């Protein structure tokens, strides 16, 4: 049942009657031809089904050029789509079936601290620097293995030897080591340890920059939420103005030009709304990348009081020069570079020490002396002392010059750190002044709006005057949002430079465990 019917056709003529009955071979040929045609049609149907299954997704993508979407950019449901399950309905933030979610779940609604927790656990920004730490540790293990000299086996076979040779063996075997200097290995291990610490500090710097980038996105998303509310107010006012213009035009008190102006206002507000929506989607995509969350997954954020979440109770006036130096990963890396250069100076002196090479060798096959004492191998030690002291002494002077260069770079970086902090403080002062100016301008436009409303209620002005005053008031409120965002970004930059941002989420014990 439900399959392809391959039984003989019993509703046709009787095969026992007619000419076909007198030609059994021909009848058998037709039966075999029919079975072959049916098997061919079955294979053709199966091939078409496979082709449909394989090409179905590509055909759907070709029909929908905007196939790349996220749950924040929802597509309309297809006709006949099955209803969502109870599990997906109870958890609207979950990814659809077939889409893998992040390894560390994001609790919704997610505030800034929750985003930081997920980013520290699985952000793709931290992969390269964390792998670099493991690579440096492997290099350290290789340095420990240098304490054991590498043994090399050399075998020489002679096809033809002098007839006067008393040695019966036509080959010579040598077990030897390369140049071995254990003192140099000690300093190599110490240098590798410093390189591991540098890799850890670079990893910490990458984390700090990732937290700063996350804070910038969070602040901008919080500002866009408030800006979106202002755009909705603009849209409501534009609709009222269009209705007012259309009413005046229908009564003969206005012109079609007034209606077109009102319609242009609606188009402007719609374009601004689209810009806000697209900017929000781009910021959400960047936020998901920082968090290591699939782009298809919906992210519900707690953007209420985003500024307080990101900058918290940070007081830039409490930051001192000593605090800057203690929390600067760049200066700490520079200290390790200085330590490495001092080790390079010591190594340049160690190179004056001779190197050793020892091993075992059989009797030379070309020797005239036969093996008489029964010893299969003969040990030897080689001491190498190159007399290139002039070159090595110049290398010592060169390493001292490099140490002075590293020290000057450290002083320059320290000066730059203080200079960057002072510049960020100046930017904060400018941003605070801009906020005060924008707030005063907003208050003034609000008073003008109240004055216009009073004149409209007393019949001294028309409704279009209220629309103009309202546009000015909403524009000044929007300008306050932009200035406050600039102030918050300046505070975030100060928090990043001072080390307060990374210090709030990364403690010294975490750094030691890396």
Image (cartoon, rainbow, N blue to C red):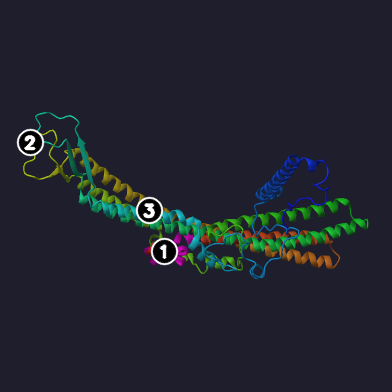
Q: Would you place residue 180 above or below residue 418 in this image? A: above
Q: Looking at the picture, does residue 359 appear above or below residue 120?
A: above
The single residue placed furthest to the left in the displayed view is 373
- Please name the residue that numbered disc 3 is placed on: 135
Pick the residue in front: 150 or 509.
150
Is residue 511 rendered magenta in the image? Answer: yes
| Label drawn at residue 197 | none
The label on residue 369 is 2
Q: Would you call the spot at circle 2 few (<14 residues within 10 Å), some (14-19), or many (20 or more)? A: few
Nearest to N terminus: mark 1 or mark 3: 3
Give the farthest residue toward the right.
Answer: 252
Q: Give the residue pinned by disc 1.
A: 320
Q: Quadrant of residue 447?
A: bottom right
Q: Nearer the viewer, mark 1 or mark 3?
A: 3
Distance CA(mark 3)–CA(mark 2): 52 Å
Percent across and percent down for residue 175 are: 19, 44
In the rendered image, residue 453, in percent from the top left (x then y), is placed at: 79, 66
Q: Position of residue 124 (x, y in %)?
A: 50, 56
Q: Is 301 placed left or right of 31 in the picture?
A: left
Tell me the quarter of the image containing the C terminus. Answer: bottom left
C-alpha distance separating marks 1 and 3: 36 Å
Magenta extent: 493-512
Q: Is residue 366 above or below residue 471?
A: above
Disc 1 and disc 2 in contact, CB within 8 angstroms: no
Q: Residue at x 83, y 48 (%)?
A: 12
* Marks 1 and 2, how far apart at CA: 81 Å
> Quarter-wise, where is residue 144 in the image?
bottom left
Main secondary structure along the magenta-highlighted residues: helix
Disc 1 and disc 3 in contact, CB within 8 angstroms: no
């Amino acid at each position: 049942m439900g399959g392809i019917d391959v039984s003989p056709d019993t509703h046709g003529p009787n095969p026992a009657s007619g000419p076909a009955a007198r030609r059994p071979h021909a009848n058998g040929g037709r039966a075999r031809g029919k079975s072959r045609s049916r098997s061919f049609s079955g294979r053709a149907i199966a091939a078409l089904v496979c082709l449909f299954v394989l090409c179905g997704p590509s055909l759907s993508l070709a029909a929908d050029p905007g196939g790349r979407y996220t749950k924040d950019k929802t597509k309309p449901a297809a006709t006949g789509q099955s209803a969502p399950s109870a599990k997906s309905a109870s958890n609207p933030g979950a990814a659809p079936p077939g889409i893998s979610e992040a390894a560390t779940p994001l609790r919704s609604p997610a505030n800034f601290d929750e985003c930081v927790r997920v980013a520290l656990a699985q952000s793709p920004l931290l992969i390269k620097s964390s792998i670099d730490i493991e690579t440096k540790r492997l290099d350290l293990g290789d340095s420990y293995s240098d304490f054991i000299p590498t043994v090399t086996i050399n075998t020489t076979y002679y096809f033809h030897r002098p007839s006067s040779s008393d040695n019966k063996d036509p080959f010579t075997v040598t077990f030897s080591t390369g140049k071995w200097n254990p003192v140099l290995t000690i300093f190599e291990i110490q240098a590798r340890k410093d390189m591991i610490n540098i890799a850890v500090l670079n990893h910490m710097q990458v984390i700090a920059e990732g937290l700063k980038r996350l804070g910038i996105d969070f602040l901008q998303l919080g500002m866009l939420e408030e800006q979106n509310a202002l755009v909705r107010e603009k849209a409501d006012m534009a609709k009222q103005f269009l209705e007012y213009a259309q009413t005046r035009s229908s009564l003969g008190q206005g012109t079609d030009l007034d209606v077109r102006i009102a319609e242009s206002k609606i188009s402007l507000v719609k374009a601004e709304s689209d810009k806000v929506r697209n900017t929000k989607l781009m910021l959400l995509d960047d936020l998901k990348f920082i968090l290591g969350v699939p782009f298809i997954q919906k992210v519900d954020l707690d953007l209420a009081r985003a500024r307080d979440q990101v900058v918290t109770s940070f007081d830039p006036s409490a930051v001192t020069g000593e605090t800057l130096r203690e929390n600067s990963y760049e200066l700490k890396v520079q200290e390790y570079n200085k330590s490495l250069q001092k080790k390079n100076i010591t190594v340049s002196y160690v190179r004056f020490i001779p190197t050793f090479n020892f091993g075992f060798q059989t009797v030379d096959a070309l020797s005239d002396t036969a093996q008489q004492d029964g010893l299969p191998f003969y040990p030897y030690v080689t001491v190498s002392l190159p007399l290139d002291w002039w070159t090595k002494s110049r290398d010592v002077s060169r390493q001292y010059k490099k140490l002075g260069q590293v020290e000057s770079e450290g002083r320059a970086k320290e000066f730059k750190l203080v200079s960057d902090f002072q510049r960020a403080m100046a930017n904060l002062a400018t941003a605070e002044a801009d906020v005060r100016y924008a707030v005063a301008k907003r208050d003034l436009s609000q008073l003008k709006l109240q004055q216009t409303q009073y004149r409209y209620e007393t019949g001294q002005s028309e409704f279009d005057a209220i629309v103009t005053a309202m546009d000015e008031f909403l524009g000044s409120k929007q300008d306050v949002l932009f200035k406050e965002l600039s102030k918050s970004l300046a505070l975030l930059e100060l928090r990043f430079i001072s080390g307060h941002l990374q210090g709030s989420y990364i403690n010294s014990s975490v750094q030691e465990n890396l």
